[in-house]
Image (cartoon, helix red, strand yellow):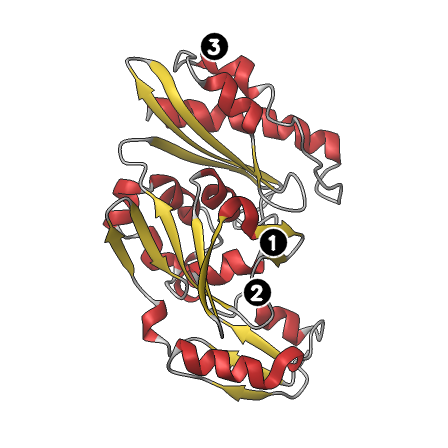
């Protein structure tokens, strides 16, 4: 289908983008890489009168080291995140997840911030961001504010970004030296994950000292597997040591039921994938 007619503007600064957003209000829609919005427009599931393109705002691109954190601009492409040495060294879980995200064409066009702002619970980046304790920097007419990942994902396709605000960057605390793995289950390659698990662990002397585990598509938002994380601390970094902790992966979840599987199937997958992800993260 062809999208409904709309006006288009491509500001060159965040302030210009915010002014356009304030001017057009509910009639406006932000476009980043367009990998989520364009299909919606083509199917006429949304028909904004104004599309505000962030693609010409250079300040929203790039990756930098800020001491205790890696900062990723919202308009940085998945490809640039995936191939960045800083991300690989200090936030390897993000590298692992971005490698599994869609295909090369999407990774070259889609943006890190755009995918997170879209907040699809089946998206590949929410669980890693949540597991690593990311912070989201959001700009509005009153200035900027920072929101923790635990407060950023509000509900299905809903985040803490206000109608008059723009996500500008994501700050990810360094997890240098941690093992990481993103285990994703699909029926067809490049499909949205039926379930996926993002695991980062710090191993000390053959024992898991710290663990961060995020779940993809196990509820209306990405989730932390808190029971698994707690049970992993002090466990041996072996398959036997990890198995009991992984069995708690589905606790507190409310997975969807659809053509790809019912809720119980997803709970079973979460347990299996958690065991695999944590073991690979712990053993390299």
Q: Position of residue 65 (x, y in %)?
A: 24, 52
Q: Is residue 267 above or below residue 54?
A: above
What percent of the width, then of the height, locates residue 276?
48, 25
Query: Can I make out residue 225 in this image?
Result: yes
User: Please, is residue 257 above or below residue 48 in the view?
Assistant: above
Local crowd size for mark 3, using a 10 Å CA cut-off: few (<14), some (14–19), many (≥20): few
Q: Give the percent coordinates (x, y) of residue 66.
A: 25, 52
Number of numbered discs overlaid on the protein picture: 3
According to the picture, the residue beneath numbered tag 3 turns out to be: 240
Instruction: For marks 2 and 1, give the CA distance.
Output: 10 Å
- The residue mark sitting in front, 3 or 1, is 1
- The answer to whether the residue labelled 2 contacts the one labelled 1, judged by CB atoms less than 8 Å apart, is yes
Q: CA distance from mark 3 to mark 1?
A: 34 Å
Q: Earlier in the sequence, mark 3 or mark 2?
A: 2
Position of 264 with respect to 140 (left or right) is right
Please tell me whether mark 2 or mark 1 is closer to you in this view.
Answer: 1
Mark 1 Cα shell of 10 Å, populated few (<14), some (14-19), many (≥20): many
Residue 22 or residue 81, whichever sits in front: 22
Asked if residue 260 is positioned above or below residue 240 in the image, the reply reads below
Tell me where residue 256 sits by quadrant.
top right
Foreground residue among 154 and 180: 154
The residue labelled by disc 1 is 120
* Image location (x, y in percent) of residue 269: 62, 29
If the image is split into quadrants, where does the C terminus sit?
Answer: top left
What residue is disc 2 on?
Answer: 36
Residue at 23%, 47% (x, y): give it.
Answer: 67
Instruction: Judge left or right: residue 1 versus residue 243.
Output: right
Nearer to me, 92 or 155:
155
First in residue order: circle 2 vs circle 1:
2
SS at mark 2 in the image: loop
Residue drawn at the location 63% of the way across and 51% of the way down: 154
- Spatial CA distance of label 3 from label 2 is 41 Å
């Amino acid at each position: 289908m062809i999208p409904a007619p709309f006006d288009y503007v491509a500001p060159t600064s965040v302030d210009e983008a915010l002014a356009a957003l304030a001017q057009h209000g509910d009639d406006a829609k932000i476009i980043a890489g367009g990998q989520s919005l364009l299909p919606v427009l083509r199917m006429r599931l949304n028909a904004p009168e104004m599309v505000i393109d962030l693609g010409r705002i250079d300040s929203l691109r790039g990756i930098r080291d800020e001491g205790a954190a890696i900062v990723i601009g919202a308009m940085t492409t998945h490809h640039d995140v995936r191939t960045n040495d800083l991300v690989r060294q200090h936030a390897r879980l993000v590298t692992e997840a971005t490698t599994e995200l869609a295909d090369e064409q999407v990774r070259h066009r889609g943006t890190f911030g755009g995918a997170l702002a879209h907040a699809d619970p089946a998206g590949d980046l929410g669980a890693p961001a949540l597991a690593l304790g990311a912070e989201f920097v959001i700009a509005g007419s009153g200035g900027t504010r920072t929101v923790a990942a635990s407060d950023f994902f509000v509900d299905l396709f809903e985040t803490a970004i206000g109608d008059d605000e723009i996500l500008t960057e994501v700050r990810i605390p360094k997890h240098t030296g941690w093992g990481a793995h993103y285990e994703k289950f699909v029926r067809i390659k490049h499909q949205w994950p039926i379930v996926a698990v993002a695991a980062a662990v710090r191993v000390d002397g053959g024992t898991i000292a710290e663990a961060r585990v995020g779940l993809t598509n196990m509820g209306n938002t990405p989730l932390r597997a808190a029971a698994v994380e707690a049970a992993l601390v002090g466990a041996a970094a072996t398959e036997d040591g990890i198995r009991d902790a992984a069995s708690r992966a589905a606790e507190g979840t409310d997975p969807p039921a659809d053509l790809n599987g019912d809720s119980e199937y997803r709970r079973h997958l979460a347990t299996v994938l958690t065991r695999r992800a944590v073991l690979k993260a712990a053993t390299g």
